[in-house]
Amino acid sequence: MAVAVEFGAGLALTLGLFRVAWLILATSMADNYGADDAKAALGWRVDNSVALLSSGEDYFVRATWTTRSERQRSVLFRPAKDNELVFDESAPARAANVLLARAERPTIGDLRSIARWIDLQSSRGYYKRAAAIVAAMEAQIEPNSSLQPAFDAGRRSPVPARYVLEHPSVNLRDSYLSTAKAFAQLSLISDPSQQGALVLLSDIAARMGDRRRSVALLRLAGGRSLRGVIAHTRLIDFQVSQADYLGAIATADALQRLGGKIRYILGEFLTSAAIDARSYSALSEFLVEGPQWRHSLFARLSDYQDADSGLRLLTELAKKRNALHAADLAPVLQLLTKQGRTAEAYLAWIQFIPESKKSKARLLFDGGFTEDPSNIPFEWNVMEFPRGSIGFLEEPSSGGQRAMRIEFVGARYPRLSAHQYLSLSSGRYRLKMEARADSLRAARGVVWRISCRGERERVLAETEALRGSMPWRDLYVDFEMPTAGCDFPVLRLALSAKVAPELVANGTAFFRNLQLVRRPGPSVDSSLASPSRIDVTGGSHLRTAD
């Protein structure tokens, strides 16, 4: 008997717990199903499904949903107190209740809510006209009459579902802006550090036509923090519209410190300032201050294949007695040479070269390697390569002399880039230097070549190949410059090879005191003469150039 009672009590308790669990689950599922029904009824597009409309103290919710025939339907609801709708339980009404919180009146201090509210009142200002049309239909009055309540509170029934005509041309009413302004001001009072509130107030002032106050508020917002990108970019927009290019460039300069994607966008803006004839003068004035993006600006102009704008900027800077740096000159002069305008590049280099370098601008520039590589075409151009290194350094026990050092560490097919363009007239010349090698293993050694540029390289001269180990020794080679067809030849360091497998090297080579001198004697056009003979010091032989 006791066992039966105990069994019955346990069963009753189990059934009770099961019933409670089922009720909880059913309630949860009902809530979820209700939400799903609401989403389904409106197609669940939060940005288009509901909007807050206002007329004085009256607020309306516009709900939109897609019918089975794939047509958009719209209906207006009027919320009662406590954010509840006063209408029936139709699917659109339930959906509007679900979405009402997303379109409610903004909360003081919630800047996003205020901004969204302003957007609903301005960019979607046509909803106001839609409400007027629905009200006119209901009251059977002209659509142009003043806005009437869209619903009969006594009947407590919704306006019949109708297609709502939308009129984007409706202007934003001043009363809405005044309300938004009050919200933003109260937000600023509650937290004076809110930069966003100042931006909102600036936007409202601009919409109200008070441009001066709008700009003053933007400047104030920008002064709060550099990270307020919106304030600064809007200020740049205004400054450009007022032809205040120097101010716009200064604002962009401040924003450049943020880095990231904004830096790229501002780089595009500054590049356009260099290209535009109206603003490049202001830009050159700002560049005198040496902003950190100065060198990258010239590189960007080169990317745009706009050498003329680069030359114009360089000329403006030179007029202001501002020292031009190699990083300014190199991209512009390199682009000119790529475009086949080498003579222009050379004249620009002669014009803009600093005084400290002019004494080294002879037939060969800086053969003592006293200047760091600049990558200007008529100076030393040096580029590192995989499994090797190249650079200028001071040799121990050399009395302060500097040398070019090239090290190969099993380099295969190294693309050596140590060269400079030469400006030579026709005649006879001699290239001479000092060289040494340290365990340099290369199939045909390392050489210096002078060649004419063109579709096919035409070698005018080549030094004796350097390889193995040897102390400092003198090398020289004589060559003839033709009278035509060889403007601005190139002096280049290279691995000598006839087939690709020979382009492998290990070891180190050193060169110093490079000189190029004119030799006396009659000039012979080498394009017509027999192959030149190359004299090589350090050996008692002559060989004919290949």
Image: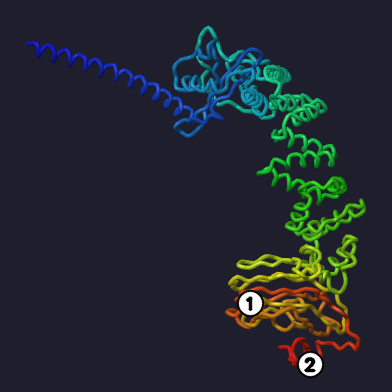
Query: Which residue is depicted at the point 53% across and 24% down?
Result: 63
Query: Which residue is depicted at the point 82% across and 87% down?
Result: 526
Query: Which residue is depicted at the point 60% across and 80% down?
Result: 502
Q: Are marks 1 and 2 in contact (CB under 8 Å)?
A: no
Classify residue 546 as left or right of residue 362: left
The residues tagged by marks 1 and 2 sit, at their Cα atoms, a distance apart of 36 Å
Above or below residue 279? Residue 539 is below
Which percent across, then down, holds residue 6?
13, 13
* Residue hosting label 1: 439
In this view, the residue farthest toward the left is 1
- Asked which secondary structure carries label 2, the reply is loop
Above or below residue 357? Residue 256 is above
Classify residue 70 as left or right of residue 206: left
- Asked which secondary structure carries label 1, the reply is strand
Would you say residue 125 is visible in this rendering? no
Tag on residue 530?
A: 2
Amino acid under disc 1: Ser
Q: Nearer the viewer, residue 366 or 257?
A: 366
Which percent across, then down, holds residue 516?
84, 77
